[in-house]
Image: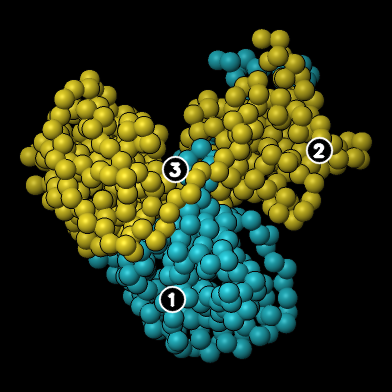
Amino acid sequence: MSLSFQVVVCGSVVPDPLQTLEPVMTPAGPALKNELMLPVWFDPWAGHALYEAAHLAKQHPGSKVTLVSLGPKAKLQQVLMTIGQKVPFEFAALDGPAGGFTEPAETAGALAEAIAALPGLDRSRLLVFGGWESAARGAGVTLQTIAEKLGIEDVFLGVDELKVLPDGGLEIAERIEGGRHQVSRCAGPPAVLGWATGNLPEPKNNPQVGMMNMRAVMPALQKARPVKLPGEGLTFTAVNVPKQLRQTRIVKDAPVDEIAAEIVEWIRK
Amino acid sequence: METILVLAHTELDGSLAPTALEALGAAKTLQAALPDAKLMIGLAGERVGDAAKAVAASGAARVLGVSGPDFAVSRYATDAAAAEALTRSAGATLVLAAGTARMLRCLPGVAARLGGRADTHVTSLSVADGKVFVSRWYYRQRMEGTLTRAQRPWFIVVDPGSQPAWSGAPGPVAVEEVAVTLTDSARRTTVTGVRQVAADAQTIRPDAELLFVAGAGWTKKQADGQTHVPEAETLIRDFLRLTRASLGSSKSLVDLGGEGQAVLSFLSHLNQIGQTGATPRHPKGLSTCCHGEEPHTVGWRFIGERRAISLDPNCGWARGKADVLYVADAFAVLRKVNELLARG
């Protein structure tokens, strides 16, 4: 049985994790200090979702991967120079905020509209991928909301493995409590999968893939529709960086026996 | 006036998990702070009678239940249908639930279905001027925000371990059964099982007193110019066996495995702590061979006492991220620690 999928991956930018982040209150709500100046990455969980999508498409000829991103246009362009060299995909962009304090229901609404408007969308082959959380808001709310807006009833979160069965069904392993996986069988698309890390390493950069992707990425960025996320009904009263600096006692040049005895005493306390 | 609904799913044996009682504890505190607020409990599962009896003394005005074989397993379509029916039946404005994998998957969808909003990973709740506020973390536990919402129903999913659990004597209680009609499309997914490593090999122990984190240093060349991965494996396994600690790892160590390099064989992405991993809650944490930079230590936000062993006296742990930093060879220290632990 020849199977092919239309995989739509939702993902956007997050600040480089090595940057110091400081919140500021603005008239529009909380934001990050110098947010527009901060270097950004493609969100790592969305990245896993994208690599898994590309892997799936490679295994099933005729499949197509489309990355749908909502983020500041300039930042998207910046990360696509890198992520665009990893795996082949088509691209659709929405120009709007991607920060952690945006309202996920509004983000999901905009993304669902963009997905529904993709040319040639075939629900019988549709798999919507994304990160189960993000390194910004980290709520794990957006994908289920997209599923509801698109009328998709099969949703999986914390996915580490997807196998396509010979009958076209999907076997999916999701993370559950205690370091375990729940394994489910879904009759087939449409389905929404929020990926954890999966099992694939990050693909190496391939300039040829980059060249191919950029031909579609630049026009898509130029056409990016502006999106406003007003955060209706949502009021932040405070956003703070916790002061958790500890007085570190540095034990240097102490004999191993002494250190080990101290650690054992601490463990047993 | 708010109507608070505590939503919980029953376990396979019909009981309630401790995390559900934590959500109930949070709801009781909220009810006490909100004049005229009503408390209700909604249970879903194959059978809900035993769970209902367990919360009989909670003072809930109504205990609602959705039960049947379709609701035994964790599946989005049926879990969402049950939660939707319970929320509608209760007329709930605030819905509290524990952040289990099952609830985290379905409740945001139910919020969208009912025109409400959902906040997950909530770590505290408060009331001021009659308004409910919740706090949660942003940017992978780097900053904490406090917010309130106008939309109802408002689904508040609390992080396990963040709230005191409610406790009370079991007793008889009348459960109002809520009917849910499922279409065939809700059964397109079937749960076929749970995959887990053998009990002895399970290194992720959420209830452990101690989190032990292995960094990439364990697989690097040591003073003799050689790597000692098999010895590292033995030392770490022995330590975990002797202490029953939970094992975490830094991303770099897990990634090495993905790239086919020699690494500790029992580590998987599930052990990953930090920026792209878990943020577990344990009273104590011991980091070894990890440089303690921000992407790793954000996963330590909810670790009480922190100690680290590193050869680098200027590593991240030394800069206020650990209570004690031992500048020493982790191989030598762990060898001796295991010896002392084995002596009892």
**Which is closer to the viewer, label 2 or label 1?**
1
Residue B121 seen in render = no
Could you tell me the amino acid type at mark 3? Pro
Task: In this rendered view, identify the residue nearer to me: A46 or B317.
Answer: A46
Residue beneath disc 3: A242
- Pointers 2 and 3 within a single chain: no
Total numbered labels: 3
User: What tint does the image give chain B?
Assistant: yellow
Expressed as whole percent of the image width and height from the top left, the position of residue A165 reads 56, 63
Residue A143 seen in render = yes
Expressed as whole percent of the image width and height from the top left, the position of residue A164 reads 57, 64
Could you tell me the amino acid type at mark 2? Val
Residue depicted at 69% across the width and 66% down the height: A203
Task: In this rendered view, identify the residue nearer to me: A264 or B114.
Answer: B114
Q: Is residue B180 left or right of residue B247?
A: left
Disc number placed over residue B229 in the picture, else none: 2
Cα separation between marks 2 and 1:
48 Å
Task: In this rendered view, identify the residue nearer to me: A225 or A133.
Answer: A133
**Which is closer to the viewer, label 3 or label 1?**
1
Cα separation between marks 3 and 1:
47 Å
Expressed as whole percent of the image width and height from the top left, the position of residue A224 reads 45, 84
Classify the position of the C terminus of chain B by image quarter.
Answer: top right
